[in-house]
Image (cartoon, grey):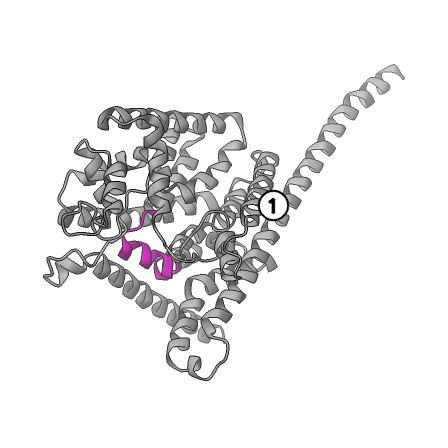
């Protein structure tokens, strides 16, 4: 019986390895579509990489003003426009400066370098999460790496040239370096803010101690300095440099997002309602309170909760679910507990299950079902995601309460012990 179980596990591992390799190849092929097929057009591969705005900024031109001028004339997508593919100038100037090492090169070379960077970022994430989660067994490390690479967010991030892997890697290593060198940690965190919609909410982690908060201050000063430099570099006012990326973003109709509060409300038909903003602020403030109360009691559990909350706050697409690599490590480490199984089920549905439902919906079941499977999958995923986030917030809160109660009890014992000693001496 034991041997049969071992053979079955080996077979499962082999299947997962094959799927991981297939996912990796698919992501690389998508990222390099033009080069691999001898196509010199810019229609495919790494479409979201912010090379164009970064290159325009490097050349001394305000990319935000230029894009807004071209867009007002209906020329932002013309062949003469320097903004190729989906590369709108919607990232802050301080973020674009961090991409200058790629902007030095032509697009055909830059996207190969970016692909290599994303692959290395994936490795850095795996190594960093192993350290943060304190995974020790080879089994745990195998499942973390294999499932992470096989998952839909990793493949889409690689293929689309998104920035999630890059920024998450720098954030994770900023956390690791926070206790060693604050300047290094501050620089790493500053680079991670290239995709600020993910890593700024995660940076609530640095509110848990004075030393970590100083890392946050260093990061802020770096971005302030880069913003002032960008203003001088392109001879634009600081106000315009700060606000124009938001103006560019407002011109882009990205459609409905995924599971964030804004997108959920839009899917329910309340796109003009203002209460998603209120709900987002409430969730954000609740997370701040939990982060402040956590102190340094359980860093990894706090990071798991923050990574779940991140996907609820700003508008996100499914490739941003790459941030769930931290909850994945939690599920692997605590797979015997109810919370571990629920978190694992959430990752299975968001990373693998929903894509399967979409495929079935477009082939067989969609023609006979009155409610599309994709819609059913979204409803199920939404309920599970918000429920899991609330559960993990409760688990963290209980952990905080237990640790504080234990410290209070130990403090009282420490005070009683000298009193007992003095009493015995008096007798």
Q: Position of residue 32 (x, y in %)?
A: 19, 57
Q: Of helix, strand and loop, which one carries label 1? A: helix
Q: How many marks?
A: 1
Q: Residue furthest top?
A: 426
Q: Position of residue 256 (x, y in %)?
A: 43, 58
Residue 153 on the magenta segment: yes
Foreground residue among 320 and 247:
247
Q: Position of residue 377 (x, y in %)?
A: 49, 68
Q: Is residue 295 left or right of residue 125?
A: right
Residue 82 on the magenta segment: no
- Quadrant location of the C terminus in the rendered image: top right
Residue 341 shows in this picture? no
- The residue positioned 18% from the left and 52% from the top of the image is 78
Foreground residue among 195 and 215:
195
- The residue positioned 26% from the left and 34% from the top of the image is 97
Foreground residue among 51 and 27:
51
Q: Is residue 60 left or right of residue 8?
A: left
Q: Residues within 10 Å of mark 1 (few under 14, many from 20)?
A: many
Foreground residue among 77 and 125:
77
Relative height, residue 293 to residue 7 (above, below): above
- The residue identified by callout 1 is 396
- The residue positioned 57% from the left and 45% from the top of the image is 278
The rendered magenta stretch, by its main secondary structure, is classed as: helix
Quadrant in the rendering for residue 52: top left
Q: Position of residue 348 (x, y in %)?
A: 46, 64
Q: Is residue 172 left or right of residue 395?
A: left
Q: Residue furthest front?
A: 73
Q: Residue furthest bottom?
A: 368
Residue 42 shows in this picture? yes
In magenta, the rendered stretch is 146-163
């Amino acid at each position: 019986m034991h041997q049969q179980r071992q053979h079955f596990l080996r077979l499962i591992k082999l299947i997962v390895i094959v799927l991981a390799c297939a996912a990796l190849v698919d992501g690389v092929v998508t990222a390099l579509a033009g080069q691999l097929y001898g196509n010199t057009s810019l229609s495919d591969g790494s479409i979201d990489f912010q090379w164009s705005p970064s290159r325009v900024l490097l050349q001394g031109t305000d990319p935000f003003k230029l894009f807004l001028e071209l867009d007002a004339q209906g020329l932002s997508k013309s062949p003469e426009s320097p903004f190729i593919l989906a590369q709108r100038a919607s990232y802050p100037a301080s973020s674009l400066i961090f991409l200058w090492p790629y902007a030095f090169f032509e697009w055909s070379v830059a996207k190969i370098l970016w692909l290599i960077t994303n692959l290395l970022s994936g490795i850095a994430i795996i190594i960093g999460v192993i350290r943060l989660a304190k995974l020790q067994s080879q089994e745990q490390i195998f499942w973390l790496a294999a499932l992470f690479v096989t998952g839909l967010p990793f493949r889409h991030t690689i293929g689309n040239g998104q920035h999630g892997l890059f920024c998450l890697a720098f954030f994770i290593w900023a956390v690791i370096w926070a206790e060693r060198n604050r300047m290094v940690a501050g620089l790493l965190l500053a680079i991670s803010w290239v995709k600020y919609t993910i890593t700024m909410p995660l940076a609530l982690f640095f509110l848990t101690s004075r030393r970590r908060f100083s890392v946050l201050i260093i990061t802020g000063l770096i971005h302030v300095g880069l913003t002032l430099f960008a203003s001088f570099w392109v001879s634009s006012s600081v106000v315009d440099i700060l606000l124009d990326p938001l103006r560019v973003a407002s011109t882009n109709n990205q459609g409905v997002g995924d599971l964030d509060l804004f997108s959920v409300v839009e899917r329910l038909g309340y796109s003009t309602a203002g209460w998603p903003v209120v709900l987002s602020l409430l969730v954000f403030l609740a997370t701040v309170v939990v982060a402040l109360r956590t102190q340094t009691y359980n860093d990894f559990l706090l990071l798991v909760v923050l990574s779940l909350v991140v996907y609820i706050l700003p508008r996100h697409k499914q490739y941003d679910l790459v941030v769930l690599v931290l909850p994945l490590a939690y599920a692997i480490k605590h797979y015997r507990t109810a919370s571990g199984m629920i978190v694992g089920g959430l990752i299975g549905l968001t990373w693998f299950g929903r894509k399967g439902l979409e495929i079935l919906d477009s082939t067989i079941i969609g023609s006979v079902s009155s409610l599309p499977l994709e819609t059913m999958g979204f409803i199920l995923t939404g309920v599970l995601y918000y429920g899991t986030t609330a559960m993990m917030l409760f688990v963290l809160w209980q952990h905080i309460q237990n640790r504080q109660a234990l410290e209070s009890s130990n403090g009282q014992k420490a005070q009683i012990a000298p009193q007992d000693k003095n009493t015995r001496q008096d007798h």
